[in-house]
Image (cartoon, helix red, strand yellow):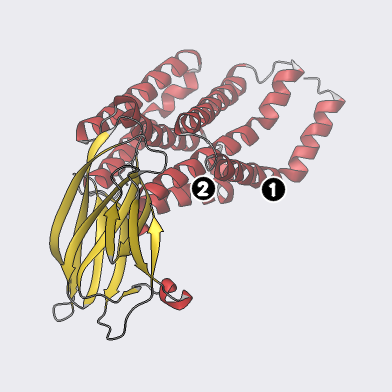
Amino acid sequence: MFISPVFARAKRWYARYERFLIPGALLFGIIADTITFRFINLSLAFSILFTHLLLSLLAITFMHAHDTLWAGYEQKTLRFIRLFAPLLLQFTFGALLSGFLIFYGFAGSFSVSWPFLLLIIFLMVSNDLLKKYYLLFIVHLSVFFFSLLSYAILVIPTILKQMGTSVFLLSSLLSSLFMFAYLFALSSFIPNIRTSRRALTVSFLSIISIMNLFYFTNIIPPIPLSLREIGVYHSVSRESESGTYHLLAEELSLIDRLRFYPPIHKVGEVIVFTSVFAPADLKTTIIHHWQYYNASEKTWISAGNISFPMTGGRINGYRGYSKKTVLPGLWRVDIENPRGQVMGRIRFHVKEVQNPLQLRTEWK
């Protein structure tokens, strides 16, 4: 087979800098997502993620079609595309995984959702460290399926404007049907795929099982909800005309702000104020689950749930608050959806104080 001098130079250049190009493509995807998703609306972010999914699927399909059907074909354009297709695959995987880390990270509390978030981080890191395995058909198609399922879990509730177990199971079903239909179509013109279908089926079923385990144990954050703001206050009032909330908060030192349990010097009624973002017209219930720490039993005790309905669409999030009479000690409040999925948690240490406090007014 004739190899043009241009292609030979490109191949030598790629081989020389591959150790920089592939992690560079991953890093570029992460940076692009981090910058982009901070300044665009939800619909455009979903469109960008869908584009990455489509590009990764095209790269996977082309790589294996080329290796099986066109490996001896002397069309140099196809050889150039095949040479750099792994870079496109690494870039799209990096962009997808970092995008999911951003969305799911904002939607949940790391102290609750850490197994799922660490799984995404592991896939991002291994995308570089284990890149030779990522070029295997079974591995990169499994990563694609994980990405597709994560995307469906994120987007379908937004489209249907509802959340719940049935919506999650629908997302899983649609993702699985697509993957098996894709495998069936691919194996019809790439016969070698048939030998991998059993291993891929096991991989897909394992991914589905893990995701369902994470969902039904409330480890997956309550996508597409995301906690925009949370704080502990002394009092709250609302202007009837403008709808603006006036909140009185303590002036805390930098050291106090960095404490795992920042202090609040008020025994009696305290307020937890939250702002939760949801897509337009999505209706659900927000729950503030109050808990206190029993030092003698070394365990957290529920002090009750306070819930209120919310409707999505407000850019800065749907605002709501709950009040609770508290005693001195360690407290925490989980912000949950009706299934008990935690989107955020605030901790504080209630202390008594003798002298008057310096309070500041905040407007929300």
Task: Tell me the element at label 1.
Answer: helix
Say above or below: 273 vs 12: below
- Is residue 82 visible from the viewing direction of this image? yes
Q: Which mark is residue 305?
A: none
Give the residue displayed 69% in from the left and 48% down from the top: 19
Q: Where does the image place residue 344, in percent across and percent down from the top left?
A: 32, 55
Q: Which residue is mark 2?
A: 124
Q: Find the residue positioned furthest to the right.
A: 5
Give the residue displayed 69% in from the left and 18% down from the top: 72
2 or 1: tag closer to the N-terminus: 1
Q: Is 210 on the left or on the right of 76, as rendered? A: left
Front position in the image: 13 or 242: 242
Point out the image quarter for the N terminus: top right
Give the residue displayed 19% in from the left and 45% down from the top: 308
Badge 1 density bin: few <14, some 14–19, many ≥20, Cα 10 Å: few
Q: Separation of disc 2 and disc 1 at Cα?
A: 16 Å
Q: Nearer the viewer, mark 2 or mark 1?
A: 2
Say above or below: 168 vs 216: above
Q: Where does the image place residue 277, in percent across and percent down from the top left?
A: 36, 42
Q: Which residue is mark 1?
A: 19
Q: Where does the image place residue 74, in percent across and percent down from the top left?
A: 74, 16
Task: Tell me the element at label 2.
Answer: helix
Front position in the image: 279 or 136: 279
Q: Amino acid at mark 1?
A: Arg
Q: Amino acid at mark 2?
A: Met
Q: Is 10 on the left or on the right of 134, as rendered? A: right
Quarter occupied by residue 348 = bottom left
Front position in the image: 317 or 226: 317
Front position in the image: 74 or 148: 148
Say above or below: 327 vs 97: below
